[in-house]
Amino acid sequence: AQKITQTQPGMFVQEKEAVTLDCTYDTSDPSYGLFWYKQPSSGEMIFLIYQGSYDQQNATEGRYSLNFQKARKSANLVISASQLGDSAMYFCAMRGNTGFQKLVFGTGTRLLVSP
Amino acid sequence: SAVISQKPSRDICQRGTSLTIQCQVDSQVTMMFWYRQQPGQSLTLIATANQGSEATYESGFVIDKFPISRPNLTFSTLTVSNMSPEDSSIYLCSVATPRDSEAFFGQGTRLTVV
């Protein structure tokens, strides 16, 4: 079974500062993928970044980067230069070793960016 | 990538009625997933829909309550039947592609049952 843990119900950050959202996972699959999504109040799920378990380098997408520590089973999202529009729920998710499997989600972290 | 159009985007329904949610994809996909997100909660998988076969439901979800159709490789519907206020949630469809790094979602349907 796969499990995702997000221990931060809420986080606050000032505009232009960096923030790290924590995510730990547990799985017995030798190969897996980790995803981060942003969910604004509209409810849509916006894909941010992906990390494969065998990727040698940490994933980056613009202001988003993933601090992947495989031995610790953590996949923390780092948002640099926070913007007011970054205020939203953030979900970490994982799935097994193929693209044809369901995603398992964490409980999410609500991020509030203040001016 | 895949572009997913989901509708309706929101609805307010009377208890005891049913609502059908549609999910249209701009390309052929093998598997589609339906998730529920109850207020303040995370996403939970309802079922996996494959074209040409019965949907596979997760524990706690049954076909009589959440019938799913998958008539072709670009379209699926989820019906929420005999609704009660506890069904008030966001319902999202998602598609799987051969690329491991992809997992796309529709815009979601925000359902309120009164």
Image (tube, coloured by chain):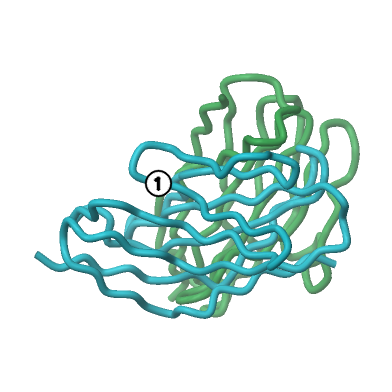
* Residue beneath the point at 33% across and 68% down: A111
Check the rendered structure and report the hue given to chain A: cyan
Quarter-of-image position of residue B19: bottom right
Q: Indicate left or right for B76 with A13 as reference.
A: right
Please report, as a chain letter, where disc 1 is located.
Answer: A
Residue at 72 percent of width and 27 percent of height = B29
Q: Quadrant of residue B107?
A: top left
Query: In the displayed structure, would residue B83 be above or below residue A29?
Result: below
Q: Colour of chain B?
A: green
Name which residue type carries label 1.
Tyr
Q: Position of residue B70 (x, y in %)?
A: 76, 36
Image location of residue B100, percent across then percent down: 72, 35
The crowding category of the residue bearing disc 1, from other C-alpha atoms within 10 Å (few below 14, some 14 to 19, many at least 20), is some
Q: How many marks?
A: 1
Image quadrant containing the N terminus of chain B: top right
The residue tagged 1 is A64
